[in-house]
Amino acid sequence: MLSCKGLFLTVTLDGTDNQVWRSLVVPPDGHLGWLHAVLQISMGWTARHLHQFTFKDKRFSDPSFELYDPLTIDEAKGRLDKLLVRPSDVLKYQYDFGASWEHTIVLTKIDLIENPTVALCVDGSGERPPENCGGIEGYKTLLMTKSRKNELATPTTKQGVRPIHHRPGFNLPSINLSLQALPWPSVSSRSLKRIIRIHKPSKQAE
């Protein structure tokens, strides 16, 4: 298989103090509609809500959403290597306009990859918030409540110090299994939801 240049991206869920992030490698000639599917799978979302991308002063989305904004560009026309050209270039991704889950996507480097039609998750940390928790502020409140309950329920050691229990991380093998199932070069909403349903981790919170 011939190698080609790939885009190495870091995706961070805004407002989580860099605790929910993914490191991805994607084909350069993919478009934003395909990247939406990659982000849904790698971050653990369920593709139930609307989304849009923002690059500088341009907005991209799925035209079937009928956002009634004449300035919004069809995301299928947003080719990745035409937008993310140099390391440190930034792309924004918003999922669920009500909760407004904002993601920052940064191009970290451009290097050779072996498979020009498959995205790969190479690193990351943290589970995404429950989709029905009320956005980032609701998520912070939820974490504070859980933290207080854990402190009260966790017995102290002989030294009087409570042991630290880290939140579970993300499932890297499951993510990459789902990414390999993504059709190329475009993914329908129906196909994406089917892949998410088949490979959804049983312990993912909602």
Image: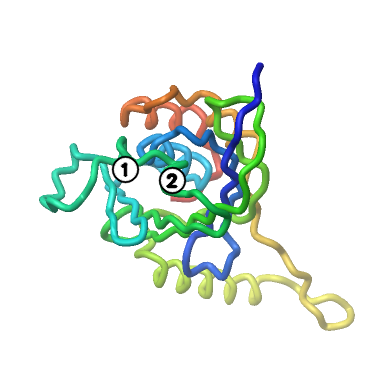
Out of 124 and 138, give the one closest to the viewer.
124
Residue 73: x, y in percent? 23, 45
Q: Quadrant of residue 54?
A: bottom left
Tell me whether the residue at label 1 lies in contact with that at label 2, contact meaning CB atoms closer than 8 angstroms. Answer: yes
Instruction: Report how many numbered discs are placed on residues in the image.
Output: 2
Could you tell me which residue is drawn at 19 percent across and 42 percent down?
Answer: 65
| Above-or-below relation of 75 to 142 | above
Q: Secondary structure at mark 2?
A: loop
The residue tagged 2 is 45
Could you tell me which residue is drawn at 47 percent across and 26 percent down?
Answer: 182
Out of 134 and 95, give the one closest to the viewer.
95
Left or right for 113, reference 63: right
The residue tagged 1 is 48
Dot 1: few (<14), some (14–19), or many (≥20) neighbours within 10 Å?
Answer: few
| Above-or-below relation of 28 to 14 | above
Q: What is the three-letter code of the residue carrying label 2?
A: Trp
Out of 126 and 204, give the one closest to the viewer.
126
Residue 90: x, y in percent? 47, 58
User: As drawn, which residue projects farthest toward the top?
Assistant: 1
Q: What is the three-letter code of the residue carrying label 1?
A: Arg
Left or right for 158, reference 32: right
Q: Secondary structure at mark 1?
A: loop
Residue 127 appears in the picture as rendered: no
Q: Quadrant of residue 187?
A: top left
Could you tell me which residue is drawn at 38 percent across and 59 percent down?
Answer: 101
Residue 36 appears in the picture as rendered: yes
